[in-house]
Image (spheres, coloured by chain):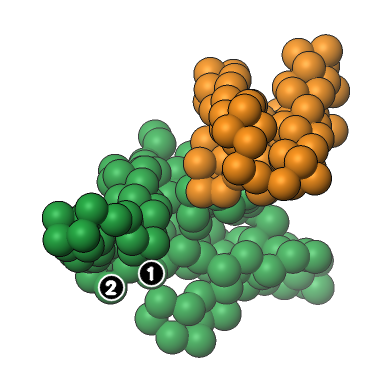
Chain colours: A green, B orange
Amino acid sequence: MTYELKHRPDGIAGTNLTLGLALTLLVLSAVPIVLAGRGSPTSVVGFIFLAKALMNRNRTVVTLHEDHMEMKAAALASRDFVRYSEIVGLEERSPTKVFAHTGGKRYRLPLIYLGTQDQALLLETLRTHVNTRARDQWAASSSSAS
Amino acid sequence: MGGLIIFGIVINATITVVLGASGEFPPILVAIMASFSALSILGAIMIGRGQRRLGARMIFIGALPFVPIGLIAVFGAREVLDELKREAFLRKST
């Protein structure tokens, strides 16, 4: 079973806000064009935000597979692949600042780009795997001790 | 992925040609943009020949002066690098 967690439309990191900002900048940049027939640098910024909003609309940020997950926080960011079995612990500094620790690397989970339910699903999935792994290790160590 | 790279490179090359043909810009600037554009084209050729990682990185560098429109080629190169990462990850799994 694969779950695709999409970029959130609402909130401060949502695409709706970026789109609104883009349209505002584009409208503002149209003013000097209408009044003086000259372009404005804000139009470039407006187009950049518009491109960003359209690219992020419905973009898959996290894909949860059976045994691993894929994360791509931003459209230009690299895609990270993490096996659940490699995650040794979760460091939860705040509700949206959570790090997954593997043997050598630390991955920041892109929670801020996900909706509330998707955040909960992602965290629950990882906590389950971490707890299962810890329980299995504990069971293995107690059986070897006895 | 290939489409984004080709489209981006064509746009970058077109911008270079238009700027060069306009005559309003210093020749040194046009020469610099042309060399970056050539680097992108070379990167695309490298990808076609199988050296995907090197080619993608060359496209990254070659598209820099053309930002923001150069981001089109950068996105294509990013997808190539992501695909390489996926293949390496899946190879490690098996």
Say which residue appears at 75% left-offset and 33% top-offset: B34
Dot 1 crowding, Cα within 10 Å, few <14, some 14–19, many 20+: some
Q: Nearer the viewer, residue A133 or A20?
A: A20
Q: Are marks 1 and 2 on the same chain?
A: yes
In the rendering, at what x and y percent does residue B87 appear? 71, 29
Residue shown at the point (49%, 57%) measured from the top left: A73
**Residue sitting at x 60%, y 42%:** B24
- Secondary structure, mark 2, is loop
**Where's residue B9, x and y in %?**
62, 26
Crowd band around label 2 with a 10 angstrom C-alpha radius: few (<14), some (14–19), many (20+): few
Q: Amino acid at mark 2?
A: Ile
Residue A53 in picture, x, y percent from top left: 31, 52
The disc label shown at residue A7, or none: none
The secondary element bearing badge 1 is classed as: helix
Separation of residues labelled 1 and 2 (CA atoms): 9 Å
Q: Nearer the viewer, mark 1 or mark 2?
A: 2
The chain holding disc 1 is: A
Res A142 quadrant in image: bottom right
- Provide the residue designation for mark 2: A12
Report if residue A20 is visible in the image: no
Foreground residue among A6 and A16: A16
B26 lies above or below B17: below
Measuring from the top left, give residue B64's x and y in whole percent: 67, 48
Contact, mark 1 vs mark 2 (Cβ under 8 Å): yes
Q: Which badge, 1 or 2, comes first in the chain's sequence?
A: 2
- Residue A142 in sight from this viewpoint: yes
Which chain letter goes with mark 2? A
Residue B64 or B81: which is nearer the viewer? B64
Residue at numbered disc 1:
A112
